[in-house]
Image (cartoon, grey):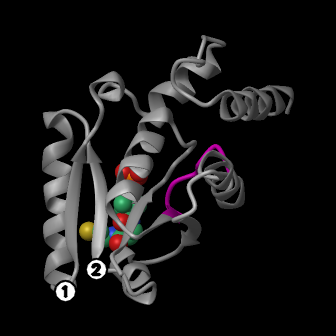
């Protein structure tokens, strides 16, 4: 059985991420979306909220599972008996970082390979941080996120503004 891990911060999941998940699920028997519980960064959404949003958007894809992880990605991949890491490549600017990530992972875990899927052109400009910035300035984020995710984001930012 081919099992892949699609890791990321997903703060929050965008339509670009969803496109990669959907396409990965078409080529692999099982895709595990790994949500990084990053202690160094302060995400807008908690890891539980990010997992919940990913479970919501992938609810109709039966071979997709969502889990959070802490620590090294390759250990998470090994623990799930996967051999493949999936990453999306948007523009050439992603390449250097992604190359570094995949080569480092391959040195520390030679049995694991990274497969890159080029992002659909429609979403090649999209990033969670830009969407967050637009939302913080009350801009329209409906072209970037599923309606339910956009609603949760607006709600979250409203809560922060009231603090
Ligand atoms: O969505 P992102 O923030 O670009 O995802 C980055 C991610 C989660 C893939 C990367 O930060 C990661 O794998 N972190 C886990 C820690 C780790 O394994 N670091 C060494 C990789 S070289």
* Image position, residue 37 (x, y; %): 56, 65
* Image position, residue 29 (x, y; %): 40, 70
Residue at image x 60%, y 11%? 139
* Image position, residue 16 (x, y; %): 42, 36
Q: Is residue 31 above or below residue 89?
A: below
Residue 41 lies within the magenta run = yes
Q: What residue would you read off at disc 2?
A: 83
Residue 64 lies within the magenta run = no
Quadrant of residue 19 within the rendered picture: top left
Is residue 12 found left or right of 5 in the rendered image?
right
For marks 2 and 1, give the CA distance. Answer: 7 Å
Number of numbered discs visible in the structure rendering: 2
Assess mark 1: CB under 8 A from ligand 1? Answer: no
- Report the magenta residues as a range: 34-45
**Residue nearest the viewer, comparing 59 with 101:** 59
**Residue nearest the viewer, comparing 35 with 23:** 23
* Image position, residue 160 (x, y; %): 78, 33
Residue at image x 15%, y 45%? 95
Is residue 13 found left or right of 123 in the rendered image?
right
Do the residues bearing badges 2 and 1 touch, measured as CB atoms within 8 Å? yes
Q: Quadrant of ligand 1?
A: bottom left
Check residue 73 in the rendering and tell me which mark sits there, or answer none. none
Residue 47 visible in the snapshot: yes
**Residue nearest the viewer, comparing 108 with 83:** 83
Q: What residue would you read off at disc 1?
A: 111
Compare marks 2 and 1 and give the one earlier in the sequence: 2
Residue at image x 44%, y 48%? 22
């Amino acid at each position: 059985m081919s099992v892949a891990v699609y890791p990321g911060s997903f703060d929050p999941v965008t339509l670009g991420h969803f496109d990669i998940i959907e396409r990965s699920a078409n080529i692999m028997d099982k895709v595990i979306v790994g949500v990084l519980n990053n202690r160094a960064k302060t995400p807008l959404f908690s890891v539980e909220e990010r997992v919940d949003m990913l479970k919501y958007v992938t609810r109709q894809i039966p071979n997709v599972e969502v889990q959070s992880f802490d620590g090294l990605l390759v250990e998470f991949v090994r623990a799930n008996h996967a051999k493949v890491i999936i990453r999306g490549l948007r523009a050439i600017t992603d390449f250097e970082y992604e190359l570094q990530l995949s080569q480092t992972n391959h040195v520390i875990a030679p049995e694991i390979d990274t497969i890159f899927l080029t992002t659909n052109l429609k979403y090649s400009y999209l990033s969670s941080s830009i969407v967050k910035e637009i939302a913080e300035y009350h801009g329209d984020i409906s072209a970037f996120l599923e309606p339910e995710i956009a609603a949760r984001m607006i709600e979250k930012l409203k809560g922060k503004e009231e603090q």
